[in-house]
Image (spheres, helix red, strand yellow):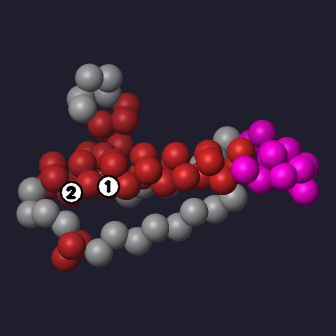
Amino acid sequence: MQVDCHLDKSQCAESKDDKAQAEYIATAEAAKEAVWIRKFVDELGVVPSNNYPIEMNCDNTTAISMVKEPGIM
């Protein structure tokens, strides 16, 4: 399963941290949607179950550090 998302910089807040938080939240919401879609498709039983990890990509290094560092948020 592949989920693509584009974030327009003009729609972001001015602060680097605000942009990182927005991308962090958007990525978390996309991950929840991907898990829901996978469970839904699995319950339909029309395709074999897929146990591969869901790959999420993010190019915002500050947002990535938020995920890797416990207690940041």
Name the residue tied to disc 1: 23
CA gap between label 2 and label 1 equals: 6 Å
Which image quarter holds the C terminus? top left
Which residue is depicted at the point 84% across and 52% down? Answer: 44
In the rendered structure, the answer to whether residue 21 lies left or right of residue 44 reads left
Whether 47 is drawn above or below 11: the answer is: above
Please identify the dominant SS of the magenta region: loop
Query: What is the three-letter code of the residue carrying label 2?
Result: Lys
Query: Residue 60 location, x and y as percent?
Result: 32, 54
Query: Residue 45 location, x and y as percent?
Result: 89, 50
Query: Which span is picked out in magenta?
Result: 40-52
Query: What is the three-letter code of the residue carrying label 1?
Result: Glu
Which image quarter holds the N terminus? bottom right
Name the residue tied to disc 2: 19
Whether 48 is drawn above or below 67: the answer is: below
* C-beta proximity under 8 Å, tags 2 and 1: yes
Residue 44: which disc?
none
Query: Residue 9 location, x and y as percent?
Result: 23, 72
Is 44 in the magenta? yes
